[in-house]
Each structure stands twice: as structure tokens, then as C-alpha cells.
Image (cartoon, rainbow, N blue to C red):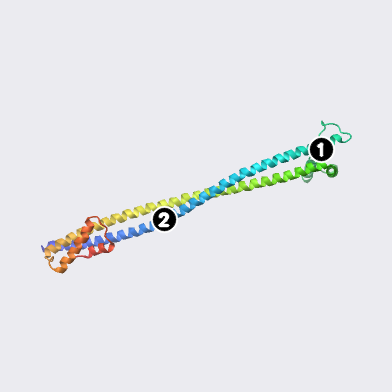
Amino acid sequence: MAELKDTLEVKRKLVNQKATQYRNTRDEWNSRTKEHTVIRNELNAEVRELIQNVRQQREIREQMNELVREKKTVRNEANKKVKKAKSMLDSERSDKDEREPGHRGRRERKVTVHSLKREFDRLDREMEMGKHLGQNEKKVMKRMKEIRAQIRDMQASEDSNGELKEARGMLKEAMVEQEDAHIEVQKAAKAAQEAHDLMLQWNKEVDRQRELAEDAHRELRKSKKEADKAHHFYIVSLRCLHSIQDILRAMQGTSTGENQRGARGEVQDLMSKLMSGDTLSTEELMQLQRFD
């Protein structure tokens, strides 16, 4: 009997040690679970905020795209005005040429201020590139001087003609309106592209943060599973511990006495709660482990 008692005492100490180990392991995993929960929740909050940013940039992009369409409509109207003004100016110039003495007819190529400016710009570029040297350079310089004089004369002549002057003014206004509309289209298109690029960047960040949140959730589930497993072994250890203690008490005959009965009753109450599936607090579980 004494040998059995000694064996049970050794087993009781071993089970008590194991119970303590399982409780500590459970508490460590529970601590990790809380850490992973905090990390996951913070990452999910960041993901929600990033998604809101994506939606905001998408709305801005759509607004800018709508603005681009509106500005293109304005620009198209300006293009029509420019075309109409040019047509009126060409018509007035043709009428003026036909009224002038020595007019040779429409088959001859018409010289305009615009064509003279194009010729002047071409000769100027060629001079900068060194295409005209020596005597040829003098000829080109003379021609450029003639062009400037011809442009001045034609502009002065047009200024003296009220209808031509009006047509030229309309063309100038239409071209300014056309250029302004084109700039507005470019600005709106640039803003739309910037919003689109930023939206894509936020999308990438959403994917990255979401992946981190999923990793944290996986770690949370893993730590919770390990904590539950350790808790299960801890409960089993407690049951074994109290079974050994019951045997030792029965062998020692120490179940008499008011204090012993009270303590035993408290243990049975806690074990009944445990066996019925109720959750015991950490303090109650440690109290169970201390009863001997």
C-alpha cells in the first residue's frame, strides 16, 4: 500500500507539473492571439481606408473624364469658328484681289500673309543651318527683306479694308478661343490621368495590406487553435490530478472533518462546472490545481 501511495504521489507531482506547463503554454498562445487580433484589425481598418481612397480617386477620374468630354465639345465649337473665320477672310481677300487692277484670275497661286510668313520661317531656318553661303546668302537675305516689306504692305492694305480687318479680327478671336479650349482639354485630361494613376497605386496598396491582414488572421487562427489544444490538455491534466488526489485521500482516510468536506465540496462544484462544459475563470482553474 505504501508503495502504491508513493507511486501515486510521484504521478500527482508529474501531472501537476504538466498542468502548469499546459496552462503557461495556453496563456502564451492566448497572448499571441490577442496580438494577432490587434494587428489584423488595424490592417483591416487601413484596408477600408485605402478602399475609400480608391473610390475617391475613381470618382475624381470620372469627373475629370466628363470634364474632358465637355471641354472637347467647346474646343470643337472653337474649331468651327476658326474654320468659318478663315473661310470669311479668304473670301474677303479673294474679292479684294479680283477688284485690284492687273488681276490674272484664280488659276494663279494666291500669295497671302500666311504663305509669306511660312516662306520667311523656312528661309530663316535654312540660314541657321548654313544652307545658304556666299552670294546665295545675299540673295536669301534680300528675299527675306522683301518678304517682311510685303507682309507689312499687305497687313496695312488689309487694315485699310474694313471688311478684311473685321474678318481678321474674328479669326484672331476664334484662334484664341480655340487655343484656350485646347489648353482646358489638356488640363482636364492630365487631371483624369493623375487620378487614374493614383487609383491604381491605392489599389496595389489595398492588395498588399489585405494580404498582410490575411496573414495576421491565419496566425490568429493558428495561435487560437494551439491555445485551445493546450487548454484541453490542461483540463485533462486537472481531471487526472484530482482523480489521483481522490485516491490518495481515500487511502489516507482524510475525507473526514468539516474543513476537508468544505474544500472537497468546493472542488466538486468547480469540477462539475468544468465537466458540464461551463467556462471557468483563470483564477478558478488555478484554484482547482492548488487543491490537494
Q: Which mark is residue 93?
A: 1
Q: Quadrant of residue 132?
A: top right
Position of 176 compared to 9: left or right? right
Q: Position of residue 129 (x, y in %)?
A: 77, 45
Amino acid carrying label 1: it is Arg
Q: Is residue 138 visible?
A: no
Quarter of the image that includes the N terminus: bottom left
The residue at which mark 2 appears reads as 41
Q: Which mark is residue 110?
A: none
Q: Kindly report which numbered mark, 1 or 2, lies closer to the viewer in this rendering.
A: 1
Q: Residue at x 16, y 67 (%)?
A: 260
The residue nearer to you, when weighing 94 against 36, is 94
Please, what secondary structure does the residue beneath circle 1 have? helix
* Structural distance between the alpha carbons of marks 1 and 2: 77 Å
Position of 259 compared to 87: left or right? left
Quarter of the image that includes the C terminus: bottom left
Q: Quadrant of residue 164?
A: top right
